[in-house]
Amino acid sequence: MLVLEVELLDELFVEVFKSISISLSAKTAIFNEHIIEKLKKLPNIGDTVYGIFRQTKIIPLTITGITFNDFGITLSAKNEEELGYSTINLLTDNTGMEWYKTYEEAEKSVKEILASRSLSKNKDVERI
C-alpha cells in the first residue's frame, strides 16, 4: 500500500513538473521574444545616432560598441569634433544623455525641452 502511494506521488510529481516546465518554457520564450524585439530596435555598430547635449544641442554620435551586462544594454559612441577622443555611454532606456535614431526625433525633443523651459519661466514671472 505504501509503495503504491509513493508511485502515485511520483506520477503526480512528474505531471506537476511537466506543467511547470511548460510554463517556464513559455515564459522564457516570451522573454526571449521581448529581448529580440529590443535588439532589432538598436542601432548597429557604425550607425549614427543623435544625442542631445546640455538639453539644447544636437550632436551626431557614431556607435562604436554594444555591451550587455547586469544593468542592461549600453551603447558606446563617439564624436571627435564635439567630445574629443572620449567615448560616451548611451543607455537603451534613454537615461543619462538622451539619444535618438534620427535627427528629426532629436530635434522634436529639443523643441519640447525649450517649450517646457519657456512655460516654466512664464509661470515664475506670474508669481512675482
Image (tube, rainbow, N blue to C red):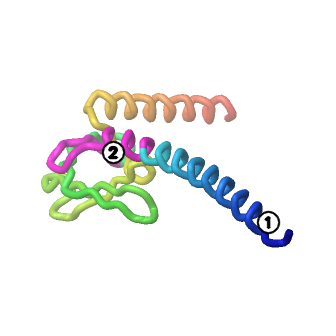
Residue at the location (32% across, 58% down)?
A: 89
Residue at the location (39% across, 33% down)?
A: 109
Cα separation between marks 1 and 2: 52 Å
Residue at the location (37% across, 56% down)?
A: 73
The quadrant the C terminus occupies is top right
Numbered disc 1: secondary structure? helix
Numbered disc 2: secondary structure? helix
Disc 1 marks which amino acid?
Answer: Leu
Relative to 74, residue 109 above or below: above
Disc 2 marks which amino acid?
Answer: Leu
- Identify the residue position indicated by label 2 in the image: 39
Q: Nearer the viewer, residue 80 or 99?
A: 99
The image quarter in which residue 68 lies: bottom left
The image quarter in which residue 10 lies: bottom right
- Identify the residue position indicated by label 1 in the image: 4
Query: In the rendered image, is residue 81 in sight?
Result: yes
Q: Residue furthest front?
A: 1
Q: Which residues are magenta?
A: 33-53
